[in-house]
Amino acid sequence: MTQYLELNRRIVEKGVWVENERTGKRCKTVINATMTYDVGAGECPLDTTRKSYWKQAIAEFIGYLRGYNSAAQFRALGCRTWDANANANESWLNNPARKGEDDMGRVYGVQARDWRTPEGNSIDQLRKVVNDLSNGIDDRGEIITFYNPGEFHLGCLRPCMHTHQFSLLGDQLFLTSYQRSMDVPLGGNFNQMQVFFLLAIMAQITGTKPAVAAHHIVNAHIYEDQYELMRDVQLKREPFSAPQFEINPDIKTLEDLETWVTTDDFKVIGYQHHEPIAYPFSV
């Protein structure tokens, strides 16, 4: 939690203003930041200086793990984060690969569950990693990546948090997640929760013990229309104690995640927070 605030403070105090071509907006930017989360201790990295919508963060990642490719599928899980990118992104609306309303294309979870080879075959990266970890195997390549430059033109958005590598030390499971770009006020706390969740749920369905997740961000930025809210409102607030996170113990397999799991199977306990802040979103 304090790591998130420290990153925002670093951007405010030491960041450099740069123009972003995709959005047409200026961003105050720093390069390279790492946050770590002790998942084994169960302490959520949820920001308490404003209300964070943690169920949406988990719902989105459940959609990735299922290989969803439609904003409608994410809405059914209780997550609306893909509505704009699927339906209000001008370049995607004009892309002949778009199949219609709510289509996201071959992004994120599609790559995790159905990576296409030059021969036309499909690789299920997630299932390979789950099978290996369940059998105590760490081949130093237990990697799930959404980053496929050969298919960027087939999706509405390049992945921001793009690669996740799992590592085993005995029965302890570690996670290292890589993110090329982070809209810190809006996406930062969302992505923190997703990294935490991913290690927690993968440990549970593979019969391992969650250890520590490391979250590496390359380009961390605050958009110009978010800057004053961060500097003058959020960073002036005092944080509360971190909440605890619990998972339904009946979730035991990847198939459970693929079929019946909902956000009601997860609990955040003792989440005390300040009022929400309506940061602008840049499509």
Image (cartoon, rainbow, N blue to C red):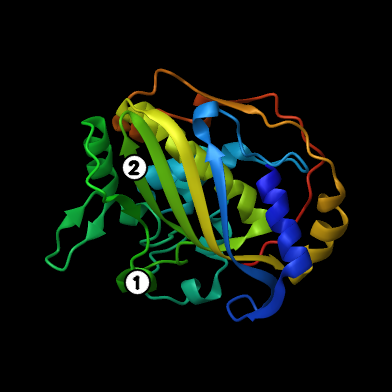
Amino acid at dot 1: Pro
User: Would residue 97 be seen by someone viewing this image from the given angle?
Assistant: no
Rendering coords of residue 105 (x, y %):
38, 62
Rendering coords of residue 41 (x, y %):
54, 27
Residue 190 vertical position relative to residue 43 in the rendered view, above or below: below
Mark 2 closeness class: few <14, some 14–19, many ≥20 residues within 10 Å? many
Q: Kindly indicate whether the residue at mark 1 contacts the one at mark 2 (C-beta within 8 angstroms).
A: no
Q: In this view, does 36 lie to the left or right of 201?
A: right
Mark 1 closeness class: few <14, some 14–19, many ≥20 residues within 10 Å? few
Residue 193 vertical position relative to residue 148 in the rendered view, above or below: above
Q: Residue at x 36, y 49 (%)?
A: 165
3 or 85, nearer to the observer: 3
Furthest residue toward left: 119
Labels 2 and 1: the sequence-earlier one: 1
Q: Mark 2 points at which residue?
A: 167
Q: Is residue 56 left or right of residue 159?
A: right
Q: Which residue is drawn at 70% across and 42% down?
A: 47
103 or 123, nearer to the observer: 123
Does dot 1 land on a helix, a strand or a loop? helix
Furthest residue toward front: 169
221 or 263, nearer to the observer: 221
Question: Which image quadrant: the N terminus?
Answer: top right
Amino acid at dot 2: Ser
Question: Which image quadrant: the C terminus?
Answer: bottom right
Q: Is residue 36 left or right of residue 73?
A: right
Q: Name the residue under label 1.
A: 149
Residue 89 vertical position relative to residue 109 in the rendered view, above or below: below
Residue 85 vertical position relative to residue 137 in the rendered view, above or below: below
Does dot 2 land on a helix, a strand or a loop? strand
Rendering coords of residue 237 (x, y %):
85, 45
Q: Quadrant of residue 257?
A: top left
Rendering coords of residue 203 (x, y %):
38, 31
